[in-house]
Amino acid sequence: EAIALSLYYASMNVVIVGYGNMGKEVEKVLVAREHNIIATVDPMVKDAEYSELTKDILSNADVAIEFSLADAVVDNARLYSEAAVPAVVGTTGWETHRPDVTQIFEKSGAYICGSNFSIGAHIFFALSETAARLIAQLPQYDIFMYEIHHSKKKDSPSGTALAAGNRIISELERKSAIVTERLDRRINEHELHIASVRGGSVPGVHTVMIDSDADTLEIRHTARNRSGFASGAVMASEW
């Protein structure tokens, strides 16, 4: 439904918060879809217009799109709420603060957050969830995951991997806990293991493996570049 609605949108005034690689991809999509970028904010990127987000910057904004740092999300949320500006938050690694952010926006404003806004990733989520449901009555199948990202990614495992893992355990009673650390023991049957690899310039690969003595199935999402993430974030802001 969100995808369909996003085909009919009015031009928006947008503040981009976080002007690194993802912020610049968002900028390209916004320009292509004829939105107005009224400010770019990033304390660590020289070509951003502003180094600090303020209420004044948000005063004429219809929406903010954020791909910044995890430790900035809560403070930024307060500013969005005070300015009554909706926000699309694609930053990862701040999940433990989500109740705080939700409470802030309950006072004023609204936000959409996601570990991965790409359409393909959401198909991957749906397929993973369906697969978990199918093997619920097939105890001979085990399920586990691994993800690969570029060497500059700051969190591990990825938010996308955790989101997929949570969907899997919601449908598979025999898996009730996600394990992400290096294992120096035998894994317990109730644990879903997610392994992470960091290196090179890989935008993102997520693989769910379903394995038995007889055969193996793989569900994989491979991001070729950041454009899918950016397009999905802009579509979310239009919705």
Image (cartoon, helix red, strand yellow):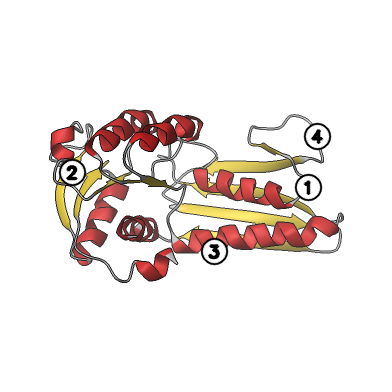
Q: Which residue is mark 2?
A: 40
Q: Which residue is mark 1?
A: 173
Query: In the displayed structure, would residue 108 be above or below residue 65?
Result: above
Q: Alpha-carbon neighbours of circle 3 within 10 Å: few (<14), some, or many (≥20)? A: few
Identify which residue, 115 or 98, lies in the foreground: 98
What whole-number distance in Å separates the C-alpha atoms at marks 3 and 4? 32 Å
Q: Secondary structure at mark 3?
A: helix
As shown in the figure, which amino acid type bears the numbered disc 3? Ile
Tag of residue 103 = none
Residue depicted at x 23% and y 66%: 33
Q: Which residue is mark 3?
A: 123
Q: Secondary structure at mark 4?
A: loop
Say whether marks 1 and 2 touch (CB < 8 Å): no
Residue depicted at x 78% and y 57%: 211
As shown in the figure, which amino acid type bears the numbered disc 2? Thr
What whole-number distance in Å separates the C-alpha atoms at marks 4 and 1? 20 Å
Q: Earlier in the sequence, mark 2 or mark 3?
A: 2
Q: Earlier in the sequence, mark 2 or mark 4?
A: 2
Residue 212 at least partly seen: no
Q: Alpha-carbon neighbours of circle 4 within 10 Å: few (<14), some, or many (≥20)? A: few
As shown in the figure, which amino acid type bears the numbered disc 4? Arg
